[in-house]
Image: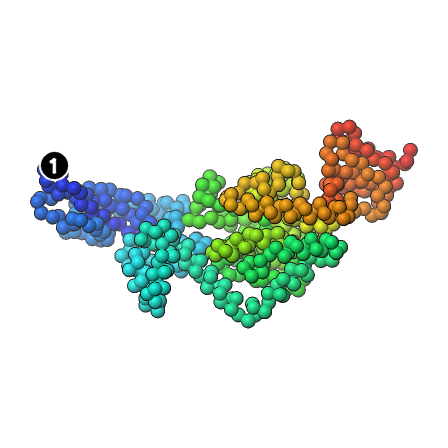
Amino acid sequence: EGLTLKLQTVVKDNAPSGDGKKTCSVKQRWVVGGKRVCWTGQGGHRGGNTECGCAGKDRAFAASEVADSDAPHSRNALPRHHEVEFLSSLKGMHDSGFRVPGVSGGGHDPRDPEGHLAHEFNMLDVNKDGVLSEDELHQGLRDRNWEQDELQELFQELDANKDGEISLDEYLNGMSGRNAVKWWTELESTHAWKTSKEARYEAGLARLGFNRTDNIKALKEQWDSVNQDLAPMMVVPYDVFKRHGKLPRSSDRITVPLNEMREGGRVVFCSHNWMRGDEEQCRSNGHEWEGSAHPDDEKATKHTLVCDSVEQLAKTKGWDLGSVYVWLDFCGIEQDIFERKMAGVKSLRGYVAVCDAVLVPYPDPSAADALTVDVLKTYGERGWTRLEAMVAYSMGVLRNLETPDLWVAWKGETGSFELMQYDFSLNPEHLPDMGMLTSEMDRPALKEHQEKLLAEMEAHVKRNGYVTQHGGAVKTVACHPTIPEVLASACDDQVVKLVKRYTGMTLLKMEGVGTLISFIAFNRRGFLLAGDKNQS
């Protein structure tokens, strides 16, 4: 994978023993890509009254030097057959999916997709000890016309744990963020970007559609929550998304602003929980941990599922696939600049509001047993995913849709692909602010989103009253005896519906039941619904 494998012998002076003689301990270790993999052995020697030549300092010998019979402490070196044995072991570790944490490994780390930063780090690491000293950083970058004060500031910025050294993880974290800042700075300095802020805002307004004046105000409020300066809505053309071969990251720079979409473009919002959110979750689910959180697994399972889903959704709705765009948090929200990342999180309601459909790629066949997304295992347990589904639901209410444009895709137990439209429950125990969060600091922002959505849906019902869609005048309505929010309605269009009383969303539709249904009623426990078709 382009990593450096080194055998180091580290020699340390010990305190004199009881007889006053000097002692020296020797440890040997394998180092891969600047990371210590394991100690391979240890030994030592006892000198006379004179220094053994390594007193007061650590020494590291290259593998060739250790194997040289004339090298210091060579009798403690790892025998050649052990080196071959370890190399064979390392190859087996690699074949079974072994990765060194924090090492890009040829593009595995999303902070460094092409491995350029890891290569640069190795070039700066002159003594190949796996960390950068301040002198190494200064020496390496001074040749690139960095000023001394800039170099000192950079070192302090990169040395996150303040131990006087820069690890590869620290270098990737810091430099990927600086690259993101540079990209945004250059983009925002262009005349086209400066003059398109209003166009980006108006592109979202145009997607809200025609509606009652009061409803448009509520929909506009969602879009107004987007921070157009720090977190404008960025989408990926579907053909580019598919060719990318994996879930794109913001650092891949393949997104375009909303106002640059093709005319008649459709946007699919991907709502999902990350498959490798942290190392513990990743390993417990049997996935490879590659040094940082990632929304997909190492086989790009979710990317494949999203592609299958978007193509099926476009076919179902009659969309031109060439005009479909994808919004995904991993690329739609800046990952390397904290201020922009937080602005993107706070803009979520607005992003969902202007999308044509919300897609939940759910790589688990258990989705077939659920009726609403808030009961899906893991997905329905988390606060942010609940919020995204709730926004899709509320947008359906404000647009007077029978069911929200909320779709779940999964692979069945036999490997068959499934895509179905789902509902969202307003069960108080399943609201976003009751869900799990990675950081409790997010809960106030989550609750703020939630309260605004609930208030807007309540105001909508007060303005419009009970709403459902029939092909004629509603003849009769029945209230469910044990579930106050459920109603049944019937009409001479030969359709009976179970609907949510407070939003008008359809739970169940029964077609072809006859004409002139003048009266319907539930039994006492609400298990049966009876209708009188002949007014007798």
Say whether residue 180 is left or right of residue 63.
right
At 90% from the left and 36% from the top, the residue drawn is 534
Which percent across, then down, holds residue 528? 77, 31
Q: Is residue 484 visible?
A: yes
Label 1's element?
loop
Residue 522 higher or lower than 10, as above or below: above
Residue 482 higher or lower than 268, as above or below: above
237 or 15: nearer the viewer: 15
41 or 263: nearer the viewer: 263
Within 10 Å of disc 1 (Cα), the crowding (few <14, some 14-19, many 20+) is: few
Q: Can residue 314 be seen in this view?
A: no
Residue 270 higher or lower than 323, as above or below: above
Colour scheme employed for the rendering of this structure: rainbow
Which percent across, then down, holds residue 487? 77, 38
- Look at mark 1 in the image and give the residue it sits on: 18
Say whether residue 131 is left or right of residue 320.
left
At 44% from the left and 58% from the top, the residue drawn is 177
Residue at the limit of the structure toward the top, as seen here: 524
Q: How many marks?
A: 1
Q: The N terminus appears in which quarter of the rendering? A: bottom left
Residue at the limit of the structure toward the right, as seen here: 536
At 45% from the left and 41% from the top, the residue drawn is 280
Which percent across, then down, holds residue 161? 36, 50
Residue at the limit of the structure toward the left, as seen here: 49
Q: The C terminus appears in which quarter of the rendering? A: top right
195 or 462: nearer the viewer: 462
Q: What kind of residue is marked 1?
A: Gly
At 66% from the left and 54% from the top, the residue drawn is 221
Say whether residue 124 is left or right of residue 215.
left
Which percent across, then down, holds residue 380? 59, 41
